[in-house]
Image: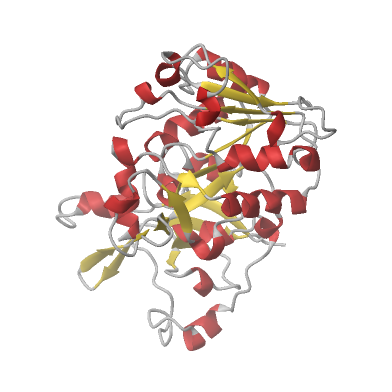
């Protein structure tokens, strides 16, 4: 249910989810623990944000001195430019400021910056944030926001899910470091997977127990089990952090059993008791349907679940391809035609296992190979 509901984020009014403070703290602390100087003397940009309400802005402003930041920039998108229209009420913070403009409050984005002790209390924190209206609406594709992107060292945000492809391309175009939230299924996108394969992007530390909780203006529209009326939050399981900042969990190798032990002792009925792992009919690789069933002693190519990336260590395995699109691994050995099966198109998009005279298509799989010492 959660997966199907997250796909609703592609509709305009459900395109924004607001990240919890403790989730941001847990994620960012993982990079700090690995490299205490990762943010030192860096300019951090938080686009696609609502600085007055944003936990991203609050977190980085409160930790400005601790992280050794050079500058913090946070921008918002104008209410009138959003695809969905809801009654808009400016915050008291904005209304009570002398620069409040009744016309600009809905048509212009806002920019918050932090780089010095404005209050004179001897520290730089959230009380020193300065703001003004942007010249435009705050669209990340505008020249105004691109200029801020180019100034920044690191970009961190939870972009609208439906714009994930475009937003990632916007970051990559400028060759910036980043930490962003997205749908796990984005791994299979043709714009995304090459970055994963070439080790230019990987998964972050992750949400606690794999559960991501967000606030949203439309929380009550989600079904029971997704929306929690007690907290007012929605829960999704297929959301992750994408980044090119290093963290320690990424270098922790998986503890795995040899193939013989998996076939004998695996907790998965699909593996235990079999004579061997299934081999794809159209890829020179074996099917491994569970990450914890990867055989430690197998040196050939293996097809593993997309969720393997959450446990991936580049020192332990090499990612050589994916079965969800055109052959990019050099492992594809067969193309099906209508003479083979009525669903030959679907079979060509995935790894296929031949059972008797029939073909079984698998889920999208990452193709990996053990790194030899």
**Residue 169 showing in the rendered view:** yes
In the rendered image, the quadrant that contains the C terminus is bottom right
Q: Is residue 372 above or below residue 176?
A: below
Residue 209, horizontal then vertical, whole percent: 53, 66
Left or right of 62, for residue 173: left
Which residue is drawn at the image coordinates 27% and 51% (left, top)? 221
| Image quadrant containing the N terminus | bottom left
Residue name at image x 61 percent, y 25 percent = 112
The quarter of the displayed image where residue 355 is located: bottom left
Is residue 204 visible to the viewer in this orientation of the structure?
Answer: no
Q: Residue furthest right?
A: 122
From the viewer's perspective, is residue 268 above or below residue 215?
Answer: below
Q: Could you say where residue 86 lies in the image, as x and y percent from the top left?
A: 31, 32
For the point 68% across and 63% down, the residue is 252
Q: Please determine whether, in this image, residue 189 is positioned above or below residue 101.
A: below
240 over 162 or under it: above or below = below
In the image as oriented, which residue stretches furthest toward the top?
135
């Amino acid at each position: 249910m959660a997966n199907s509901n997250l796909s609703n984020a592609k509709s305009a009014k459900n395109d924004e989810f607001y990240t919890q403070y403790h989730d941001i703290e847990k994620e960012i602390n993982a990079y700090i623990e690995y490299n205490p100087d990762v943010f030192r003397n860096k300019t951090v940009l938080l686009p696609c944000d609502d600085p007055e309400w944003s936990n991203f802005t609050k977190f980085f402003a409160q930790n400005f001195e601790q992280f050794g930041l050079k500058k913090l920039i946070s921008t918002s998108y104008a209410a009138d430019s959003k695809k969905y229209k809801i009654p808009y009420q400016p915050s008291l913070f904005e209304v009570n400021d002398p620069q409040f403009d009744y016309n600009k409050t809905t048509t212009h984005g806002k920019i918050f910056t932090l780089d010095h002790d404005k209050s004179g209390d001897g520290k730089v924190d959230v009380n020193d944030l300065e703001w003004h209206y942007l010249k435009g609406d705050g669209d990340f594709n505008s020249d105004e926001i691109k200029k801020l992107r180019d100034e920044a060292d690191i970009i961190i945000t939870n972009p609208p899910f439906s714009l994930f492809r475009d937003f990632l391309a916007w970051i990559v175009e400028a060759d910036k470091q980043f930490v962003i939230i997205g749908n796990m299924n984005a791994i299979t996108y043709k714009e995304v997977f090459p970055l994963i394969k070439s080790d230019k992007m990987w998964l972050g530390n992750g949400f606690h127990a794999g559960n991501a909780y967000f606030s949203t203006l439309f929380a009550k529209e989600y079904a029971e089990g997704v929306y929690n009326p007690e907290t007012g939050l929605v829960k999704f399981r297929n959301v992750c952090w994408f980044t090119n900042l290093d963290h320690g969990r990424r270098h922790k190798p998986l503890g795995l059993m040899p193939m013989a032990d998996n076939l004998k002792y695996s907790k998965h009925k699909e593996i235990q008791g079999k004579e061997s792992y299934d081999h794809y009919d159209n890829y020179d690789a074996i099917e491994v349907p569970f990450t914890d069933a990867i055989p430690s002693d197998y040196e050939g190519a293996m097809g593993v679940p997309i969720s393997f990336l959450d446990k991936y260590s580049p020192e332990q395995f090499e990612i050589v391809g994916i079965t969800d699109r055109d052959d990019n691994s050099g492992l594809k050995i067969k193309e099906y035609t209508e003479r083979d099966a009525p669903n030959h198109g679907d079979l060509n998009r995935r790894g296929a296992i031949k059972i008797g005279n029939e073909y079984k298509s698998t889920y999208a799989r990452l193709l990996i190979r053990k790194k030899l010492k």
